[in-house]
Structures are given as C-alpha cells and as structure tokens.
Amino acid sequence: MHPRLHAFLSLAGLAALGPLAFDIVLPALPALGKEFGLSLPATRSLLAAYMAAMATAHLLSAWASNALGKRAVLLAGALLLAVGSALCALAGAPWELQAGRILQGLGAGAAAAQLPLLMRSHSSRRLRLLAEGAIPVLAPITGAFFVLCASWRLAFWLAAAAALLVLVLLALAPAAPGKAGDRFQFAELLGNFTYLRYAACHALCFGAVVAGAAGLPVMVSLDLGLNAGHIAMLQAAGAACTLLQSFGDQDGSMRQRVTFGIAMMIIAAAFIVPWDLLEKGVDPFYYLLGCWSALCLGFSACVMPLAAGALKAAGQQARAGLSLLQFASHAVAAAAIQFTAGGKVEDAALVTFGTAALMVIAGAAVLPLFIWRSAYVEH
C-alpha cells in the first residue's frame, strides 16, 4: 500500500473510532434496554460510563505515552476498543454490557489523546474535519438501520471490525521517532488560570451538548413513541450542522464567535425545555429537530475558539493542555449524563436541557474577566 494512502486510512480510522462507538449506540438504546429489562433512563449509564472511561484514558495514555511511546498506546487503544465492542455484542447481562462500554471508552480515549500529534504531522485540516465529521453523521443512520432491520448487536460488531482494521493498519505502519515536544507535562498548567478558564468553559459547553444527545432517545422513544430512525435523524442533523459550521468561513473575532455560539446554545436549550407543551398544530418532533440543530450550531461556533484560546494560553505545554482539555470535557459530559438521567421520564426535557442551559451560562460566567473585554490576554 502506498505510504500516503496508508497514513490517510490510519488517521481516518483513528478519528472515527470514538464517534463511531458513541453515536452508533444512541438509536439502539430503546431496543437494548428492552432486551435487558432496563428502563431507558437507566441505559444512559452506558453512555456515562463510556465518557468517564474516555476521560480516564486521556490522562492514562499521557503517562503511557511518556513511558512507552505513542505507537504502543495507539495499538493498545485499538485493541481495547475491539475487545470492548465484541464484549458488548456478545453481552448476556447488563454488567457485561457495562464492562464492554468501559473498555470501549478506554480504547477510544487512548486513540483520541494521540490523534492530534499525528494529525499535525501527517494531515490537513480538511482531512481531520472529514474524518471526525462524517462519522457522527453516518453512524446514527447505520445504528438505526441495524436496529430496525436486524439487531442492535450489529452496531457493536461494526465498531469491533473498525477497531481491528485500525489495529492492523497501525501494526503495519513504520515506527516514527519520538520528539521532545510530544511528551505530556501537566504541572505548569495547574497554575495557568487563563488556560483553566478556557478549558472550563469548553468542558461545560461540551458536557451540555453530550448530555442533550443522551437525552434524545428518552424524549423521542418514550414521549413521542417514535422509533430509532427518528433518533438517528436528530443526531445526523446536529452533526451536519456542526460539520457545516466547521467547514464554513471563520470570520469575526474570537470574542464575536464565542458570544454568538454561547448565546445560541442558551436560547436553543431554553426553547427545547417546553417542547412537549406546544400548542396543537406544531409538530413536537420537528420543533425539537430545529432547536437541537440550533444548539449544535451554536456549539460548533464557539468550541474551536475556546479550544484555540486554551491551547494558546498553554503555550509550550499545548500538547498536555489538549489532553487535560479532553479529560475535563469528557469528565464533565459523564457527570452531566448521569445527573440528567434521574427524575421522571416526563421531565426529561426540563431536566436535560434546563441543566444544559445552566451549564453553558456557568461556562460563560468563567470568561468575563478577559474574553468579553478582548480576544485574548496574555497570562
């Protein structure tokens, strides 16, 4: 295989593993819960466990990368994700499913922690956006197809096959020498309050969107009585909005983009809260679709400037800064999913998207000391 094609396939596969393992499962949650006798809110713990495992993997893989090198970490990550996906596909009890999701999260997190280094060296921004954006659009559609036409277990078999393919590609790739700048060093970041403020806002906005996505199956399946195809439609629409915004022009200052994105997220989340109290003549599903798309569009507008601000503030520790940013974002997402899973089903919209709005407001409150006054202030 040509080296450039090999690198392209390896990077695309690595970028796809995390979104594939998360997005393909959401449409399957109602069928999965029915088979194991779990309530639909209870199945959201599978998503929380996955996010918590990803958060843990970001820090563990940083230590392992320093000790063993990034190639070993990538191979271990792909293997863990393949084993975890197969365990989920073969699960006969809820605890086996939960264990498989934890292994999936550890594997996906290990790959995600190393991916920016490889992207920086071997690929363009457009390849990165395509690899990371196309999967969130296609994965839920594929997951819904499996649920409606075959079995939810096929979604996990597909994730296992993708992980094994990436494992083979990585095993065949030539070893790359390590660089001093590839090492993770976190100590200096803990006293860098400019970095920490950017990272906190990013984590809260990310957690709000992921918790919202985790609540969609409850609202669509239980409140509206619709099927996996409608859940997938919501997921794909939100991912498409995020992808379009990422590919679109990035005009305007960081302050303008963050202000626009945060304001849109708060407004969209607030409008979703009363969606099941709409007057007759308004289709609640399409109302939800519009609000969810607006929420994802707002997130896409502010997430890149927030991440860029955090990494700029991190300076020479940008690699460690990105790993810590990913850890915080996935940890907050796991906590938000678990928190919003409680309560009555009929209050799912109020709890989930009310919490999301409050999280975004809290994220905005971290920033006024500098971003509302100027695009960036040296720390």
Image (cartoon, rainbow, N blue to C red):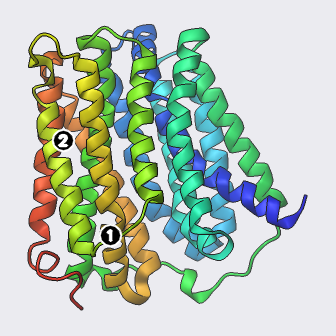
Using residue 277 as the reference point, say whether residue 214 is left or right of it: right
The percent coordinates of residue 53 (x first, y second) are: 43, 47
Q: Is residue 312 above or below residue 52?
A: below
Category of crowding for the residue at label 2, using alpha-carbon neighbours closer than 10 angstroms: few (below 14), some (14–19), many (at least 20): many
The percent coordinates of residue 149 (x first, y second) are: 60, 10
In this figure, what is the number of numbered marks?
A: 2
Question: What element does badge 1 sit on?
Answer: helix
Q: Quadrant of residue 325?
A: bottom left
The percent coordinates of residue 125 (x first, y second) are: 56, 67
Q: Residue at x 34, y 70 (%)?
A: 251
Residue linked to disc 2: 268
Q: Residue at x 31, y 27 (%)?
A: 216
**90 and 156: which one is in front?**
156
> Of the residues shown, which amino acid type is indicated by label 2?
Ala
Q: Is residue 190 above or below residue 10?
A: below
**315 and 341: which one is in front?**
315
